[in-house]
Structure formats: C-alpha cells, structure tokens
Amino acid sequence: MLSQTHSNIEFIIVNNGSTDNSEDIIAKYLNDDRIVYIKQEDAGPSGARNSGLNTATGNYITFIDSDDWVEPQMYEKMLNALKNTSADIAVCDFNLVYEDGRETKAKYSNTKNEIIDIDTDLYNYLGRCLINPRSNNYIWSRLYRADVIKNIGLRFERLTLGDDTLFNFQLLAHIKKVVFLEDGFYNYLQRSTSIIHSFAKKQPLAGCYASQFDFLADHYKASGNRQLIDSLPIFAYTRMRSVFFYSRLSGMSNDEIIENLKEVFAGRQIAEYLIGL
C-alpha cells in the first residue's frame, strides 16, 4: 500500500478496537509522515469508515479493508481517469484471492473501460453494479471525489451488514458521471471467517437487508429523483437475492429462508416494492 506510484497521498489507519497485535505492526510505520493514525473503541466497519471520512483532508477518498491489498499503480491510474473524464467516481475491477492461494489475480466482475452518465444511462449502471451476478458495487474498488461526499454530509449508516452497498447507492442521487477501468487493481481476500459469512451462520439475514432497503428508499424519496425512485423494485429484488445467496452459504434451507422472508418483510417497504415487480 505504501508503495503507491502516486506520491501525494494521505494514509489514514483506523485501529477499530483491535485485540490482536495490529498496534505493534502499525507502530513500525508511524515514522512515515503520510500516515495518520486513529485509535478508537470498536465502532463496527461503519464507525471506522466514518472516522476516516471525518479526518481525511484530500480531494479524493477511497477505502481499503484490513485483509486486502492494492496494486502499486491503482490510485495513480484511477486519479488520472477521474481528471481526464471529469467523473465523480472511478471504479476498477478486482481480483479474488483465496486463503489457499487459488485464483490469485483472477479478475472477478469483467468490468470494461467505460464512462456512464447517470442521468441518461442509469440502468446500464445498475446492470453493471447491482443486477449482474458478478456485480461491482464495493467501496474499495472506487475512488471518489471528496467534495461530492462532503457537500451532502453523507456518512455510513451503522448497519450490521451492507453499509458499504447502501453508501454507494445513496451517493447515486448526487453524482453525474462514473468512469470504469478494466484493470484488476484491488486484491480481495476471501475468508470463511468474514463478517457476512460469520453473521449469516448466527442469525437470519432478512432483517439486515430490509433495514438497508428502508434507508435507501427514504433517501431516494427525499432526493425527489423520479428515476431513482422508479428503480427501487430492482433494489428490492437484489436485496432478496442477497438474502438467499448468503443464507444458503450459512446452511439454511430454502424453506427456512422463505419463512424468514415472510416474517421479516411483511409490512416493510421492501415488500411493497417486491409486489410491484
């Protein structure tokens, strides 16, 4: 990470209540004046990301999860793409890397070089970042113009799951243009102990995704953007699809998942939009 080819960069490390030797590892790098170190009680992923957002001073913002790593040219290439296209967000492809080394550098989402205007080509964007089974809607595959985020005061909601997905789609109401790069600059480590896999094994996921959808629906309605409001059935469908996908990974049967959906979605906004499909 510290070997980025773009030199004018600020690294914000958030120690979010770690209980291992993370602080000892971080201490070895604190003589690098590009690093800002924040130590705080565990506030969940959203709390860590919000601390970083509140501290950042640069014109562009990105995020990296703790177990992942990026290619040295990632931010130089993405920054150039933003500047050359006057886009609000740059998105790159990413590689899946498994704990046993399988599929290292295997590009996942088949992202192509493309510029998408949100006002005129929204459904192309949704197809790429939401509907496609190999979608690319992660915060860490993106470089954002900081002023877009700061001008609307957007922060991550404290959700058990999906605060990153929600953040990107809340931001969609406030951006005009996104540039995609086909390069797999980000390396995403696949772990059986990741938050979503661990959480799915402990309790049903339907409530998490219903809450996520409530936040998004309220945000789009408040924005008054008719096109985004009309797209809410698509979001409802993909949230239900995610419930099935991750619940199956946790060992739930289809019958159990359906019963949970019936119980949790009843009377929620997400059910209203699913009926409208």
Image (cartoon, helix red, strand yellow):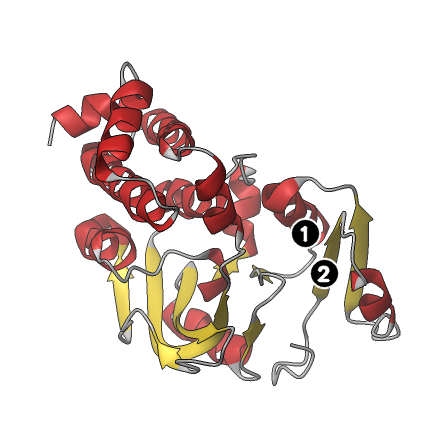
Instruction: Estimate the x, y position of residue 167 in percent, counting from the top left.
Output: 46, 44
Q: Residue furthest top?
A: 267
5 left or right, relative to 265:
right
Q: Are marks 2 and 1 in contact (CB under 8 Å)?
A: yes
* Residue in view at x 20 percent, y 40 percent: 234
Instruction: Estimate the x, y position of residue 211 in percent, counting from the top left.
Output: 41, 28
Q: Quadrant of residue 193?
A: bottom right
Disc 2 designates what residue? 12
Q: 59 or 230, which is in the foreground? A: 230
* Residue in view at x 56 percent, y 34 percent: 158
* Residue in view at x 52 percent, y 47 percent: 149
* Residue in view at x 22 percent, y 33 percent: 255
Crowdedness of circle 2 by 10 Å Cα count: few (<14), some, many (20+)? some
| Residue kind at label 1, given as amino acid type | Gly
Instruction: Estimate the x, y position of residue 17 in percent, counting from the top left.
Output: 76, 47
Disc 1 designates what residue? 52
Position of the C terminus, as image quadrant, is top left
* Number of callouts: 2
